[in-house]
Image (cartoon, rainbow, N blue to C red):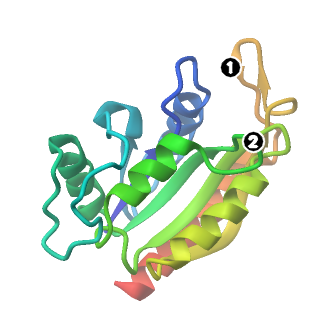
Amino acid sequence: MKIGIIIGSIRDDRKGALVGSWVSGAAKARDDADFTVIDLKAFDVPLLTSATVPGAANRQYDSDAVTAWGAAIDECDGFVFVTPEYNHGVPGGFKNAFDSIGPEWTGKTVAFVSYGADGGVRAVEHWRQIIANFHMHDVRTQVALGLFTDFDDSGLALQDRREGELSTLLDHLVSLTERLA
């Protein structure tokens, strides 16, 4: 079973890489799944302007970047979305990349590690509506990191409870992914 940890921010000086590294470190200590980091920024997915309908069953896309992105997503059985909250919603680059493919998402599991001024909770609520379109199964447990409580000038400054929250989230994600496999 392979779980992709998707770093969903493509901004310069993003916090997503720090959060993704933290999630990956905790995941690598486990032996119940193969976890891999998928950094959206590395794929350079173009804006969705293609006439090719995302979700085409043949997984053929007009862009090599989208094809590579789709292949990385297709290899996974489930995901941890490391997502910031931008303007009370999901990050545009991540949403664009999500929309650029289709069948690669269908029926898979997802858990959320979010961050933002209020922990990124509004972005996650928005994601839950979006993923339903592809019959994805979300884990209710979520880790919500506050910009003012879990970060400082040197990077991550996680509250003590965060390790336990992440462990519980990963437990639930692996369990659900196994049941649906």
Nearer-N-terminus badge (2/1): 2
Q: Is residue 124 above or below residue 131?
A: above
Q: Position of residue 141 (x, y in %)?
A: 70, 68
- Secondary-structure class at tag 1: strand
Q: Amino acid at mark 2?
A: Asn
Residue 126 left/right relative to 96: right
Say which of marks 2 and 1 sits in front: 2
- Residue nearer the viewer, 30 or 173: 173
Q: Quarter holding the C terminus?
A: bottom left
Return the residue at label 2.
87
Q: Position of residue 47 (x, y in %)?
A: 37, 42
Disc 2 to disc 1, C-alpha distance: 22 Å
Q: Position of residue 18 (x, y in %)?
A: 57, 29
Q: Position of residue 72 (x, y in %)?
A: 25, 52
Q: Residue at x 18, y 45 (%)?
A: 63
At label 1, counting other C-alpha atoms closer than 10 Å, the crowd grade (few under 14, some 14-19, many 20 or more) is: few
Return the residue at label 1.
155
Q: Residue at x 75, y 48 (%)?
A: 120
- Secondary-structure class at tag 2: loop
Q: Amino acid at mark 1?
A: Gly
Q: Residue at x 43, y 87 (%)?
A: 179
